[in-house]
């Protein structure tokens, strides 16, 4: 079993909260003010802009990691990679700067703990909003493997994200009718894994990591995850992606 250490989640990064902007700071031009709505929906006609300048600690550029810690527990508490034009960070979102840990691994570690974050926020929910505070991050102890295995784990999980992206692009170009899809020369029925299946697979995998579900139990879940029937698309994807990982990485991903 690869070596691991247990450490408070808070100690793995610098968590910088955004600013509480005032209406007087908004203008028709300038850089966008990034709220949770922008992280989920992109820049829209509801987005606010400002010409003011602020500290670099709340400046956003593509690739920054963000953790939305306040909002609807089921839909707003999440981790994101920033992929919008340069902007300024609004309150209720942490800009997460890793300390001594692989950035992609930390991203997936936060993703794997989403059920816990949702539960924490739900327990503090008032008027529809819930919160995950700095105190919560300090109390949440996580397992962190060596940097070598962090990178391997991130690469393996990243393969699932690549599959999601590729299937999204493929599905975007598929004809709407079922018969056309089934007869497509590029993608025949039964030979592609749907975006929904891959996203469910990744979510299941991340949850399994979080709660240390053994590989055998996880595989059983995957095979019977839809309607109690064996889902061979899931199993094929799991074998392809997990099969490419070396044995130590598999042990890092899940405690057998």
Image (tube, rainbow, N blue to C red):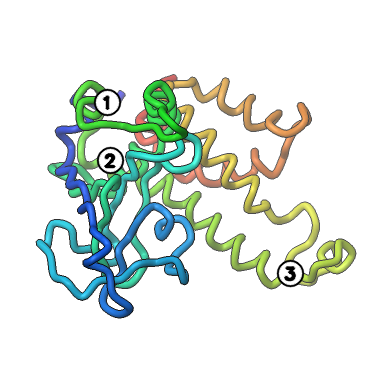
> What separation in Å lies between label 1 and label 3 (alpha carbons)?
42 Å
Q: Secondary structure beneath disc 2?
A: helix
In the rendering, which numbered label is found on residue 94? none
**In this rendering, position of residue 148 left or right of residue 176:** left
**Image label count:** 3
Q: Which residue is mark 1?
A: 142
**In this rendering, position of residue 142 left or right of residue 78:** left
Q: Residue 81 at what x, y percent from top left?
A: 35, 56
Out of 202 and 255, give the one closest to the viewer. Answer: 202
> What separation in Å lies between label 2 and label 1 (alpha carbons)?
13 Å
Residue furthest left in the image: 55
Image point 28% across, 75% down: which residue?
27
Quarter occupied by residue 39? bottom left
In the rendering, which numbered label is found on residue 174? 3
Image point 13% across, 57% down: which residue?
57
44 relative to 113, above or below: below
Image point 73% across, 34% down: which residue?
226
> What separation in Å lies between label 2 and label 3 (alpha carbons)?
36 Å
**In this rendering, position of residue 108 left or right of residue 19:** right
Residue furthest bottom in the image: 29
32 relative to 135, above or below: below
Q: Residue 255 at what x, y percent from top left?
A: 40, 21
Residue furthest front in the image: 24
Neighbourhood count class around disc 1 (C-alpha, 10 Å): few under 14, some 14–19, many 20 upward: some
| Comparing labels 2 and 1, the label whose residue is closer to the camera | 1
Image point 68% across, 31% down: which residue?
225
| Comparing labels 2 and 3, the label whose residue is closer to the camera | 3
**In this rendering, position of residue 177 left or right of residue 224:** right
Q: Quarter of the image for the C terminus: give it.
A: top left
Q: Which residue is mark 2?
A: 150
């Amino acid at each position: 079993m690869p070596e691991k250490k247990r450490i408070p989640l808070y100690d793995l990064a610098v968590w910088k909260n955004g600013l509480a902007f005032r209406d007087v700071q908004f203008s028709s031009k300038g850089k966008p003010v990034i709220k949770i709505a922008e992280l989920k929906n992109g820049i829209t006609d509801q987005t606010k802009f400002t010409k003011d300048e602020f500290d670099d600690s709340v400046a956003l550029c593509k690739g920054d990691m963000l953790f939305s810690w306040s909002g609807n527990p089921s839909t707003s508490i999440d981790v994101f990679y920033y992929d919008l034009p340069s902007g300024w960070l609004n309150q209720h979102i942490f800009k997460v700067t890793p300390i001594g840990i692989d950035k992609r691994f930390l991203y997936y570690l936060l993703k794997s703990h989403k059920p816990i974050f949702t539960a924490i926020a739900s327990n503090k929910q008032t008027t529809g909003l819930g919160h995950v505070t700095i105190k919560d991050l300090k109390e949440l102890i996580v397992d962190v493997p060596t940097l070598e295995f962090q990178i391997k784990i991130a690469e393996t999980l990243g393969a699932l994200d690549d599959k999601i992206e590729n299937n999204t692009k493929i599905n975007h170009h598929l004809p709407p009718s079922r018969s056309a899809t089934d007869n497509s020369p590029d993608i025949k029925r039964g030979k592609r894994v749907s975006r929904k299946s891959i996203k469910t697979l990744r979510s299941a995998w991340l949850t399994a990591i979080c709660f240390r579900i053994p590989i055998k139990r996880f595989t059983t879940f995957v095979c019977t995850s839809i309607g109690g029937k064996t889902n061979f698309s899931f199993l094929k994807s799991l074998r392809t992606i997990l099969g490419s990982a070396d044995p130590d990485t598999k042990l890092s991903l899940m405690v057998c």
